[in-house]
Amino acid sequence: MTALPARPVPSLPALVYEALVRRELAADLGDAGDLTTDAIVPATATATGRVVARCAGRVCGLEVALASFRLAAGGAGWARVETTAADGDDVEAGAVLATLTGPARALLSAERTALNFLGHLSGIATATRDLVRRVAAAGPARLVCTRKTTPGLRALEKYAVRVGGGANHRFGLYDAVLIKDNHRAIAGGVAPAVAAARAALGHLVKLEVEVDTLEELDEALDAGADVVLLDNMPIPDLERAVARCRGRAVSEASGGITAESIVAVAATGVEVISVGWITHSAPALDVGLDVETS
Amino acid sequence: MTALPARPVPSLPALVYEALVRRELAADLGDAGDLTTDAIVPATATATGRVVARCAGRVCGLEVALASFRLAAGGAGWARVETTAADGDDVEAGAVLATLTGPARALLSAERTALNFLGHLSGIATATRDLVRRVAAAGPARLVCTRKTTPGLRALEKYAVRVGGGANHRFGLYDAVLIKDNHRAIAGGVAPAVAAARAALGHLVKLEVEVDTLEELDEALDAGADVVLLDNMPIPDLERAVARCRGRAVSEASGGITAESIVAVAATGVEVISVGWITHSAPALDVGLDVETS
Amino acid sequence: MTALPARPVPSLPALVYEALVRRELAADLGDAGDLTTDAIVPATATATGRVVARCAGRVCGLEVALASFRLAAGGAGWARVETTAADGDDVEAGAVLATLTGPARALLSAERTALNFLGHLSGIATATRDLVRRVAAAGPARLVCTRKTTPGLRALEKYAVRVGGGANHRFGLYDAVLIKDNHRAIAGGVAPAVAAARAALGHLVKLEVEVDTLEELDEALDAGADVVLLDNMPIPDLERAVARCRGRAVSEASGGITAESIVAVAATGVEVISVGWITHSAPALDVGLDVETS
Amino acid sequence: MTALPARPVPSLPALVYEALVRRELAADLGDAGDLTTDAIVPATATATGRVVARCAGRVCGLEVALASFRLAAGGAGWARVETTAADGDDVEAGAVLATLTGPARALLSAERTALNFLGHLSGIATATRDLVRRVAAAGPARLVCTRKTTPGLRALEKYAVRVGGGANHRFGLYDAVLIKDNHRAIAGGVAPAVAAARAALGHLVKLEVEVDTLEELDEALDAGADVVLLDNMPIPDLERAVARCRGRAVSEASGGITAESIVAVAATGVEVISVGWITHSAPALDVGLDVETS
Amino acid sequence: MTALPARPVPSLPALVYEALVRRELAADLGDAGDLTTDAIVPATATATGRVVARCAGRVCGLEVALASFRLAAGGAGWARVETTAADGDDVEAGAVLATLTGPARALLSAERTALNFLGHLSGIATATRDLVRRVAAAGPARLVCTRKTTPGLRALEKYAVRVGGGANHRFGLYDAVLIKDNHRAIAGGVAPAVAAARAALGHLVKLEVEVDTLEELDEALDAGADVVLLDNMPIPDLERAVARCRGRAVSEASGGITAESIVAVAATGVEVISVGWITHSAPALDVGLDVETS
Amino acid sequence: MTALPARPVPSLPALVYEALVRRELAADLGDAGDLTTDAIVPATATATGRVVARCAGRVCGLEVALASFRLAAGGAGWARVETTAADGDDVEAGAVLATLTGPARALLSAERTALNFLGHLSGIATATRDLVRRVAAAGPARLVCTRKTTPGLRALEKYAVRVGGGANHRFGLYDAVLIKDNHRAIAGGVAPAVAAARAALGHLVKLEVEVDTLEELDEALDAGADVVLLDNMPIPDLERAVARCRGRAVSEASGGITAESIVAVAATGVEVISVGWITHSAPALDVGLDVETS
């Protein structure tokens, strides 16, 4: 595998996130609305808010955050929305990402919803970016996420991984085959499992087989797997596995890979490294809203 | 504040989580279903799965995980479901939390959904428990969460905090008043802000005021706040603030409190400590499913 | 309790009611649409409609009514929308509340939906206003509603109570504690019930205890209730109860209070009076739409 | 029109109300659940609840109320559910309508939801029954409701009218044609309006024309209306109108008809009398739950 | 029945179809979005698309198709949308129906959704039109559809029938009575079935009885059916049936009527002919999108 | 490509179709319910229904149809449900597919919903089966469907194609890349389009390129397409294209292929043939319900 071509800017259609934002705003308002703001802030008051990164990281979810303010304001709308960063930008602590001027009530009521999305997604993008950089220094591998995502947020989290410079593993049970040990056991071996899957699948579905040992790897390669998932292999075995895969199947390393161990894994020349914690355990990026009332 | 009475077992009605589980299962199945399992595993195959903690922690979300398997199986159902742990239990690595025997397809197809809920919620409960223990050794304070939750999961995450031994701050903008600096600025001071809120509120809503300095604290106490949020105060100021609150308002410390700094905060005698990262940044607990085909 | 500060204008976010309006319009149109209007009124016809109060009362739900017309018109929109009243206004019979000029089909098809919302909410606001006036003449009490609301409309009905000059009791089971006789019986008394609740609750939740007798009241006050609900007490008992509550807990009178009996109740000096029928049994205000085709 | 045949027992499919009940329970529980009950009542406690009519009236919505308890209990279920009344029964104050024994938590948490449905629908059924009785003593007319229903509850309220002995007018804009004055004005008269409607409609749709005067009535009859709505006519005109309709169209009296004026209206021999307030303004029937903990 | 008056232009409110379009777009995008377009087409690229009929037919669903493009583009919107046809137009192969200029990504991503709606509905309108023409040459009958529609699309398909020149039978079980053989058997004959239905129904519901023989027809007419469905009758019987219905009930022929047999059926003078296959089996009209990138 | 292995029985999880069935039943019942059945059939009446194929074909959707009856019956349920056929069976006219005994009302009210699903899906399965047989006699090709599906029914229709013996092309824009002429034009050729896509995609996504000529085919093969879609190629070109693809990419023929032309296409040895009309234009299979009342 040669150097990767330049990655396009990832995209996330509004149709995917607007319903989530609307639901989240409605849940935060509840039946009683924003008790504090409604009691204290006049309906006609205006204010300016600056979405700010409180620490350095990679921005992700800015459009989602802005949609929170937009949907909270309803028909009234914003006098000014200026974005000074975009998803994928690496920013320093203190960087202003966007500035909005408009109804003070909507600004204050939507603040937490906007920041919860932005902080969560930027946290994932930042963690991914950091791993991608470590991998890039060591080998040609592409970093990918898994299906270990937060319930309800898979589309957004997989997008954040792309924004972080990673790529996506399958999105669900529906878009690729991954034969694990239990499937293999029920089918009576790798070969019959692969055969059964090939028979059932459309011609546009890729087939991956999870293997624990080099013997299993050989079975998977002989059975014609498109991709093999090398699960928890010691580095020397991984090196041998990568060599055997060359020209026959894409090699993917997986299983408990940490920021520390990933460099050695990447140095084996494996083509893909999948890491679960960038989606299920990356800490949120600290983001805030500075408000100026006028 | 004297020693807390024994906390009741927290509860989470099925009405709150079943729709989430159903949506998550459907999203993982997509329109094509579980390509791998459907192709390889006969509809009549049965298997036994054991939900296992791969590392030590506090269990949370076991009923949600079991609902995943139950809803995936549909009418067919499970021959046996045995639970050997419950939400709130502290378990060691390797502990078996539940065992299910039934349709192999449903077991494999629902595995990831079940574990994603269980790992996420147990991670929050475990992080909360750890902080609660540190706090308990240092002072009388109760640990609470914030509204910095993961979009779509607030009800479940707040429940996980209770399971971890913490308590809940307000759930949304609708169930308590929290007057922040921006509200204060717009109202022209703490006193008019509190007066405006009191005028608008029902008699069952508590009112909290965020303060940065001892001067602001005095204003809030004079205005009759039920609770004061002492934001990012240095320890000596915090001690003075706690003393001034005694008998007048509940004192709450907040702002960038970490596992390291929390002991000193608790030692001030403050009554409540709120921490955002237990909901937005706690790493997932590693949980897995061991399957035995029969 | 001194004279209440001026109440702010209540607010109701569009996010709370737009989904209801959309669902209601869709339900009235069904799969076949407005058979009459579609057959008779050309798509290009325009008309002017005046939303009119057919009898005197307090206006509530005008924005909801206008949203009905707006959502029914879709992209086409209205050439003119002029509002000549606002929620909270007291109007005479014949008063024009709003005037719309635009697509005749949308005007006729949305008429019933708009008026059903407006009439229902104005009826509640008017009934509340009338009671509030009677109370104000007799004592310092604040009038509040209950959870006896019409299924599906709690957020809107509680808003109508605020528009009528009342305040809200808790919105659901989730935002305040109310210990009733059955809870007390299961807990084995008021004191253990209050202790159990305090142990489980966050520091921002108020706790109310329902009592039937002065003995129970003393128990509740000793247990530290924030609010006591004095249920169906004879006036003399109520007077004594109010005296005992002073400085210790907020007193609330409840139970079968009518427009006739409320003056005597208010005269006891009780701080809060809760009345169920303003939400579950207030008659709708008669409102109509005068259409002028052009 | 001869004496009406015996009315069948009205029915309401569970598919129509279960989603409403589930939504209402979830709204009352919110994200935090039943704070009071969860803190005080052990998960294993059982209790017996009796649904009781606190005053005399006609029962309606008992199945909906029971569904509230059933859905709140989830899988656990009820040890005993005994119904001692059914929709359509006329009961005295104090009558026990149903008795449930099972989980105390579910009983207490679902109480308000169950009673809100039952009280609202029984109120409509009772008001309808009372009018039907007055009408029956005076003439052959059938009492019907209108589209002036509470938002979100039309299906249930129209069912309550049937339970009260009334019949239903059209359910929406989609199931019958009603040509009002505005349609007539736009079409340029009754005849062209009826012609346009007939041309567009399927052969299973009935066509009603609203008329204010006897001249308009003649136009409507000549145009071939199936039904004529005699709007706000003085009694002598109404008598003449009814006579002219005989054998040509069904006659319907409408417009501000009260419990007082309805007898005179019925005495004209009109075939149908439509009354809006039985759905939009009938007071709720007082119903309660007596709980016995065990 | 004399010559039908000119049919009005059928209408379909956006409220009825927008949710369907949004759901369909979201389903096609899934969680990953349009992989191809997002990777290849820059977010800023613009293009012009022409919606084209690939073969001759009657246009139906053009607004639905345009809504697909509109909703896919979100806030950005289209620089130009020009419609050169409208629902109900008969077009030749190659006819341009609409032209859009705007974001290339939205154009390509929404193409299939737009065309699937347009092709399906135009197919139904075209099939209906063809039958209507055959019928018109032979007799006065009106062509109507049935409830044999595609799940989820009844409102749209019934609209397409109107666009094709047909009329609608009942829309569901809720808007008209149709007594079939099973109802008759349970009721113990046509007369008691009709009586039971009349007793239960509002005065705005029409009542149809399905009959297989002339004897049954007489029963139905005597029982006072508004419409009789003459099911699968041989032509000579149908002629006799039509004669007997005259002046007593509307006659409807139904049952396996094909494009071939319909002329003879229409020639009997029957008033209504219902055909199921125009909704459940009409082939889609071939429509396409010609894209020009700029 | 050698002979295909035996295809597994396709599966369709209940989670995918139950919401559709529930929505469809509710839409048919509307707010008024089944007017006819509710008026005539006693709530306690029981009946036996036999789901019958009225003409020969391949069964598909039987579980969906049975779910219609099951969901309509609610808690009451069926005394007996016997299935005498299964999805994928080829049956003769008159074959009984399933027999249900239970509540007569549910049987009659759910009939149309059940049959609409069953007829639609069996029609697609039957059309697919017929084409698959023609193809099998001529060459090794696998028959696949397209994204030209009926709005709202893609998951079910793709399942019906599998039941008919076909396989699935991609399910949406999200699970495979298909580079069409417009993408190519915007990217400036096949090579840069493929490079852009490869750079953006995960390693489990297949990439197909649509080509019109042999020159374009060479470009696509050189660019490393996994699959090439040979669009509307004359048979001689198709033969050459298939030869060039061998060992380099999967070949797929597409574009206006009919039951007549498919044999010649298959005879070219092409590996995949995609046909749109099996999903968008297959006529429904005639299925019915024979009811016996008891």
Image: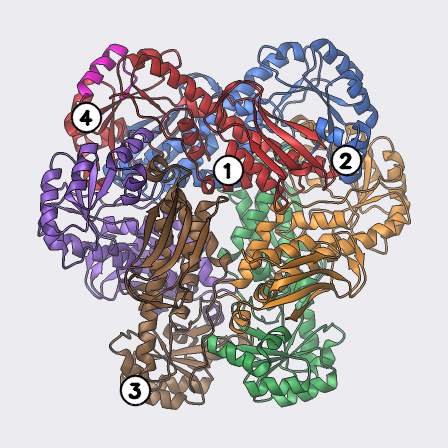
Chain colours: A orange, B green, C brown, D purple, E red, F blue
Q: Residue furthest front?
A: C294
The picture quadrant where one finds residue D84 is: bottom left
Residue position marked by numbered label 3 in the rendering: C237
Pick whichever, C237 or A194, lies toward us: C237
Give the x, y percent position of residue F10. 58, 29
Label 1 resides on the chain identified as F
Residue position marked by numbered label 4 in the rendering: E220
1 or 2: tag closer to the N-terminus = 1
Residue B178 in view in this figure? yes
- Residue occupying the point 26% across, 13% down: E268
Tag nearer the camera, 3 or 4: 4
| Main SS category, magenta section | helix
SS for tag 4? Answer: helix
SS for tag 1? Answer: helix
Report, in whole angstroms, how far the alpha carbon at label 1 lies from the one at label 2.
33 Å
Q: How many marks?
A: 4
Which residues are drawn in magenta?
Answer: E230-246
Label 4 resides on the chain identified as E
Badge 1 vs badge 3, beta-carbon distance below 8 Å: no
Give the x, y percent position of residue E256. 36, 17
Residue type at mark 4: give it.
Answer: Ala
Residue type at mark 2: give it.
Answer: Ala
Report, in whole angstroms, how far the alpha carbon at label 3 lies from the one at label 4.
71 Å
Residue type at mark 1: give it.
Answer: Tyr
Say the numbered circle drawn on residue F197. 2
The crowding category of the residue bearing disc 3, from other C-alpha atoms within 10 Å (few below 14, some 14 to 19, many at least 20), is: some
Pick whichever, D158 or D59, lies toward us: D158
**Residue C190 magenta-highlighted:** no
SS for tag 3? Answer: helix
